[in-house]
Structure formats: C-alpha cells, structure tokens
Image: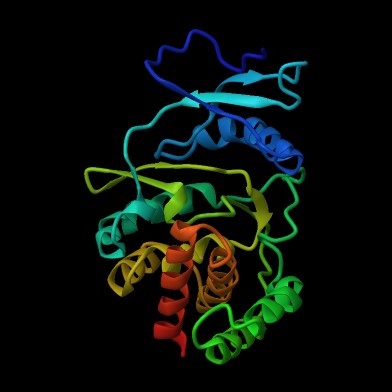
Amino acid sequence: MDTPEADIEVDEYLVRLPRRTVAAQLIRNEQRWLPTFAERVTVHIPAPVRVGSPSDAFPWHWTIATWFDGDLAAETSFAEHDSLATELATFVAELHTPASADAPFNPVRGVPLAARDESIRARLATGIAARTDDLTDDWSRALAVQPWAGAAQWLHGDLHPANILTHDGHLSAVLDFGDLTGGDPATDLATAWLTFDQGGRDRFRNALDYDDATWQRAAGWAISLGSAALMGNPEMQRIGTHGLEQVLLDVS
C-alpha cells in the first residue's frame, strides 16, 4: 500500500473504492490532486492518508481518507443552506485557480456549453422536467453568452448538496472530487441554483468576483446538471428539481 503521508494521527477513517471500471481513473485523479488542493482550501476535503494499489483482492487503486462529522446538505431543507453561502464561496474562490496543463480532461464538465448543446436539448425534449420549453429557452440564452476566455480554472466539477457536508450550520467538508477538471468556472457556480434559495444565492454570488457573462453561463450549467440529476436517485431528483425551479425563478 502506497503512503503519500506518514505519521498521521487520526481516530477515524473511510475507505473510498471505485465500483466500476469507469470510476477507477477518477480515484487516481483524486489521489493525484487532492493533496495539492488541501494545501490551499480552508475546508476539509477527502485527501488520501493512504493509497491502496490493485491486487488479486481488488483490481483498482483505492483510498483511505479521514472521516468528517456532519450531515449532507442534501438531507436538509434548502432554506437551511443560506448560512453556508459565504463559506462555500470561500471554498470556490480558493479552488478556482489556474489549472495545471495536465489537469484531468472531463468531457461533461468545464467545457464550453456548446459541447453539451445536443445532449441537453435531447434530454429536455423528453419532458423530463416541468416547463421544458422555458428551460430550453433559458438554455439557449446561456448558450449565446460569450464562452470563458480566461485560463482554465481548477474545478470541483460536481458541486451540489449531496457533496456538501455541514455541521452546526456551517460548511464542514466538500466531498467527491471524482469529476475534478480544469475549465470554465461557471460549472461550479451552478451550485448557486442547485444548493440555495434566492437569499443564499445572492450571498454566494456577492462573495465571488465573476462577471455577468460567467453567471449567465452558470445558469446554463445549472440546467445541464439539474436535468441530469433528475435521472438519479430520489435525493438527486430533489436537487435537480430545486435547481431547475430556481433557474426558472431567476431567468424566465
């Protein structure tokens, strides 16, 4: 078993194991980059304390990480998330720095919205969500915005309430960096709709320094991620429904 760090004293651990071949590389991405991220973000993230290698017992790399106490934001009401807005914005600002040239490529995160256009229109055309015509119009408006022209930024890639841990009303940890990549920061900013009601969204936005075009693309990413969540388990469906409702409230 490889050991990226030694002499670490912790009381509790968790084991993170990929369940499918497609996820095996995602674990490797976390193992490569989370120790670097942990040096600059002030919230807990699941950086590995030990790295397991493939063997006859298990075919892929796996991770032992520290256990963090708290509750998933997905298991609380969206109204309760307002108190997390500035803390989550701080995490985003700390993470969103220029990505390395060898950052993992992710074909469905961080890319220009035009790369997702065919898939999103096809998904909305199935009637998966309420008011799909309005959502399609909102998607078209986001698509018309100038693409991100700055340096690719490090992204969490899947920043929604099921990956946000809270404790006593504060942000405790951000989990599951399997979709980490470099690209348009608007991808992560979609959490403004997926995680918050209007009040929390305003506080989250005001705590970050992005232009209107980036926030308009972020609304498009909220449509992309929110509609995808509707195809998940009930917890993810709840997140997707809320996110799309919030986009319609803001944009339509």
Between 228 and 81, the one lying in front of the other is 228
* Residue 57: quadrant of the picture: top right
Q: Is residue 102 left or right of residue 123?
A: right
On the image, the x and y values in percent for residue 103 come to 72, 45
On the image, the x and y values in percent for residue 53 come to 72, 19
Q: How many marks?
A: 0
Name the outermost residue toward the front: 234
Between 145 and 59, the one lying in front of the other is 59
Tell me if residue 43 comes above or below residue 114 in the rendering: above
* Residue 15: quadrant of the picture: top right
What residue sits 72% from the left and 72% below the top? 116
On the image, the x and y values in percent for residue 58 come to 71, 22
> Can residue 209 be seen from the camera position used here?
no
What residue sits 62% from the left and 44% below the top? 178
Q: How did the renderer colour the structure?
A: rainbow
Q: Which quadrant is the N terminus positioned in?
A: top right
